[in-house]
Amino acid sequence: MENNATTTVRNAPERRRYELLDGDAVIGKAHYLPHTTGKGPQRIFYHTTVSEDYAGQGLAARLVQEALDDTLAAGIAVVPVCPYVKTWLRKHPDYQPRMTPVHPEHLTAVQHAGSQ
């Protein structure tokens, strides 16, 4: 399947994820947890997936970039726990100074959310 004009990204806060859509079909997800510290609101990005039918088109990179841009534009700090997000950030060093370092409390929040 080809990346075309019907591919969009949207935030689905009720499901705590950004969704990559081809028309109305969800073909990718960037999951996050809202988190708050004394320094303000954060989103812990912990898992990113794109349907295998859409592999090799750069769609995961687009999903992550749009999710991070939207989060930062809203004044929410980004915490990159997801391995894909970390890899993407290594390739985009201009974003790195704007990221919040991962602390044990972030990992605990992700583990706690997974056990619910």
Image (cartoon, grey):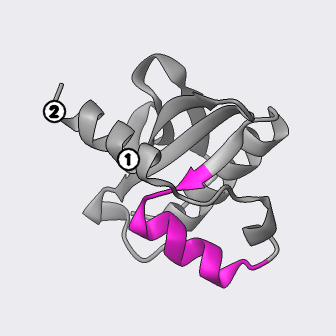
Residue type at mark 1: give it.
Ile
| Quarter location, residue 16 | top left
Give the label, 1 or 2, closer to the camera.
2
Q: Residue lying farthest top?
A: 14
- Figure quadrant of the N terminus: bottom left
Magenta segment: does it hold 30? no
Between 20 and 72, the one nearer to me in the picture: 72
Image location (x, y in percent) of residue 102: 53, 58
What residue is rendered at 45% in x and 46% in y? 106
From the image, tell me which residue sits under label 1.
27
What residue span does the magenta drawing correspond to? Answer: 79-93
Is 8 situated above or below 97? above
Q: Taking 112 as reference, is 1 above or below it?
A: below
Is residue 23 visible in this depiction of the protein?
Answer: no
Residue drawn where x is 44% and y is 44% of the image: 105
Q: Quadrant of residue 96?
A: bottom right
Q: Residue at x 42, y 60 (%)?
A: 82
